[in-house]
Amino acid sequence: MLAMALTKGRLEKQSVKLLEQSGYGIEALKNKGRALVFPDSKKDISYFLVKANDCVTYVEHGVADIGVVGKDTLLESNAQFYEVMDLGIGKCRFILASLPEKNVLKKQGHIKIGTKYPAVTKRYFKQKGLDVEIIKIDGSVELAPILGLCDAVVDIMETGTTLKENGLVVFDTVCEISARIIVNKASFRLKRNEIQALLNDLKQALKEVEL
């Protein structure tokens, strides 16, 4: 049997829909109740829902053979796993944003950047040849430049509505993000055929969606 960790929230509904289109029996995932583990009614596979960071942890330690998680989480992780497939769902992007008069790409001297994603931010500014002070923020990052905690923020943007409502503008796209399939390294050796069959089913469903 395969165990599959699905990320709660933003990716959950799209992941379940894709599995259903692939012919999997995900009725239990649609009617969750108080259950924590959900058996597939058609395939030899079980599912469980976790937060994004925990998805990576469960896959790394082999509790889950496979996981569906956003690329944003993977870019911040040092965990060991195989990233095997871009599902093309849950699309959004990392952006650099601030108040209109604070374009840090043109600023001289000390720069402070607020973000929930320090690893992504550090790599981005290193590529730009800029040495910045990164301030880790766990809440609403839009507030930080408004109150003067930092010069700009690096964050995930889907629609951009929240930024606009707070008077912030986007100065650059750091990178594009989408949901990825990750696989435990040992599982990829021991359950290669089962995993490959699942990947093939998902690929076929994605092709049919494109058509």
Image: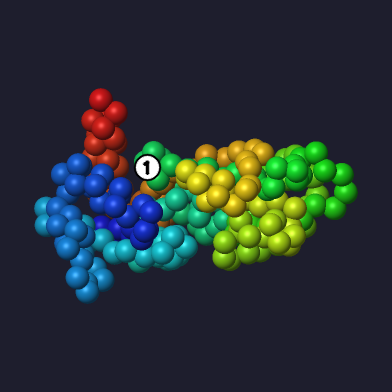
The residue lying furthest to the bottom in this view is 34
Image position of 181 with respect to 33: above or below: above
Residue 60 placed where, x, y %?
44, 61
Looking at the picture, tell me which residue is in the foreground, 160 or 198: 160
Q: Is residue 58 left or right of residue 133?
A: left
Q: What is the quadrant of residue 203 in the picture?
A: top left
Instruction: Write the residue at 62% across / 48% down.
Output: 167
The image position of residue 80, as x and y in percent, is 50, 57
Residue 84 visible at all: no
Q: Nearer the viewer, residue 38 or 189?
A: 38
Query: Measured along the vertical axis of the image, is residue 211 above or below residue 89?
Result: above
Q: How many marks?
A: 1
Tag 1: residue type? Ile
Q: Position of residue 132 (x, y in %)?
A: 78, 52
Task: Using residue 56 as the reference point, say whether residue 153 is left or right of it.
Answer: right
Depth check: 156 or 6 in front?
156
Determine whether the residue tagged by mark 1 lies in a helix, strand or loop: loop
Q: Residue at x 41, y 64 (%)?
A: 51
Q: Quadrant of the N terminus?
A: bottom left
Quarter the C terminus occupies: top left
Q: Residue at x 80, y 52 (%)?
A: 111
Q: Is residue 49 visible?
A: yes
Q: Position of residue 29 (x, y in %)?
A: 21, 60
Mark 1 packing: few (<14 Cα in 10 Å), some, or many (20+)? some
Of all residues shown, which one is farthest toward the left? 42
Give the residue at mark 1. Answer: 89
